Image (cartoon, rainbow, N blue to C red):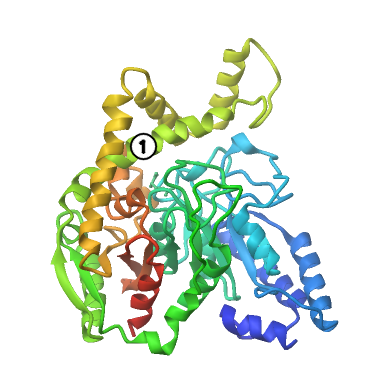
Amino acid sequence: MEGITRVKQYLEFVRNETVSVEEYTARAIDESRKINSEHNYFNIITESSSLEQAREIDKKIKANKKVGKLAGLLVSVKDCISVKGVESRAGSRILDNYRPLFDATAVARLRKEDAIIIGKTSQDEFGFGSFNANVGVDFKIPLNPFDRERVTGGSSGGSCGITQKASFAHVSLGESTGGSIVAPAAFCSVYGLCPTYGRVSRYGMMDYGSSLDKIGPITKDLYESALIMEIISGYDANESTTLNVPNEEHSKYLENGNRKIRDMKVGVVKEAFGAGVSEEVRNLVWENITELQNQGVEAEEVSLPLTMQYSIPAYYLLAVSEASTNLAMYCGMRYGKHEKLEGNFNEYFSEVRSRNFGAEAKRRIILGTFARMSGYRDAYYIRAAKVRTLIINEYKRLFKKFDALVTPTMPILPPKFAEIEKLTPLQNYMMDIMTVGPNLAGMPHLNVPAGFENGLPVGMLLVGDHLQEGKLLRLANGIY
Ligand code: GLN
């Protein structure tokens, strides 16, 4: 793509008319299509609307009219985030043919700055998975950019795969409930920044677990993540859980003056380097910690005993309970795919849901419904919510002393499909051991590509205190 691969340069070239947005977009769409035929990163590619928008931007620039900060930027969007007029299905057949009448706030804010949405990316159905192998009925599973026999990680697998594979300047919007931004980012070797809960509006997102869901950027470099954060963050009158805090200029944390990180202190979570974590992962993450130390960062071993022991059960109870409530509306009447009306209401909606939800979605609906049943609510949901508070406190205590905590992002290298088929659901859920803690606590976390072992990528996870995304960006930027 004319050698322009990074967003910063591309946006400059667009503004000074060195590059035609229309030509660049056309080539990006061609390349996306080709990549898609081999890797399945898109559920839909929006060629005509992208080109139309690109022409408009070229025209405005030629006429010296004011354009937005992201004029011409190509963005792919996880399927569960609404894009006006574009089929948005959260990777589920139950949402076949659903074309939202409005943009999600994050998308609207990007578009307001003249970004172009090139398509909807593949994901685990409604976000239910860690490998992106739980796609909905009739959807294709995305394949790892470094080895097609392996998983991309999930659930934002399509977003991370295309971000790694595209040769053109591009960013993706991902979404995380319990790790779905950073987990695939680790397996695809890209940056994934999951913001503080409430920093970015969830308006227009198809909910998985409402107290957990976050939208965040997935990018090839840190500047791109910072830039997207600046645009999509901030209070939204349409969404009561957004935080009313001033917007930050995230890219300032990457400026040269901020590159010295000698004043920073990280806690290395001891339980995250123990049994169940592969040696290759441990070694590469430690190499990066050593690099931080070489830059003058103080690193000290810390412990998160409660989080490491109880975050998985607490997370899965809360997440499936909320999911079962959120998914109840897809009954084939007002929401969700309509089928031929037959039988009474119970028969009809059971039929629609049986046919259009995948196996993992059904498992979670059943589990969640059980956990919320009267008589069980106190024993499960409420107790898990209490454990969540203890976990938040455990993190908060450490953040009094440390700027960030470090663990691997995923405990293993990207596995082969043949390997994950043998895992039980519980073994599957254990893959999230590093990521569910920060998600339960609503704390920002960033996947930093940490290197390769036998051609396969490893990710390092930096976790920060609430609203401290800037510290994570600084630390990651300080690793040379
Ligand atoms: N793997 C976790 C789950 O299946 C997290 C996925 C996500 O963040 N959507 O719930």
Q: Where is residue 377 in the image (x, y as percent from the top left)?
A: 33, 24
Q: Is residue 17 visible?
A: yes
Horizontal relation, residue 101 to residue 384: left or right = right
User: Pointer 1: residues within 10 angstroms few (<14), some, or many (20+)?
Assistant: many
Q: Quadrant of residue 69?
A: bottom right
Q: Where is residue 379 in the image (x, y as percent from the top left)?
A: 26, 26
The answer to whether 9 is drawn above or below residue 203 in the figure is below
The answer to whether 28 is drawn above or below residue 429 in the figure is below
Q: Residue at (44%, 58%) from the top-left corner?
A: 181
The secondary structure type at the circle numbered 1 is helix
Residue type marked 1:
Leu
In the rendered image, the quadrant that contains the N terminus is bottom right
Q: Is residue 147 visible?
A: no
Q: In which quarter of the image is residue 316?
A: top left
Q: Considering depth in this image, is 466 or 375 the residue closer to the camera? A: 466
Horizontal relation, residue 212 to residue 168: left or right = left
Q: Where is residue 345 in the image (x, y as percent from the top left)?
A: 62, 14
Horizontal relation, residue 114 to residue 219: left or right = right
Q: Residue at (40%, 35%) from the top-left corner?
A: 320
Q: Where is residue 101 in the image (x, y as percent from the top left)?
A: 73, 45
Q: Residue at (82%, 77%) from the top-left corner?
A: 60
The residue most toward the top is 344
The answer to whether 464 is drawn above or below residue 207 in the figure is below
In the rendered image, the quadrant that contains the C terminus is bottom left
* Residue at numbered disc 1: 318
For disc 1, does the CB lie below 8 Å from ligand 1?
Answer: no
The answer to whether 309 is drawn above or below residue 39 in the figure is above
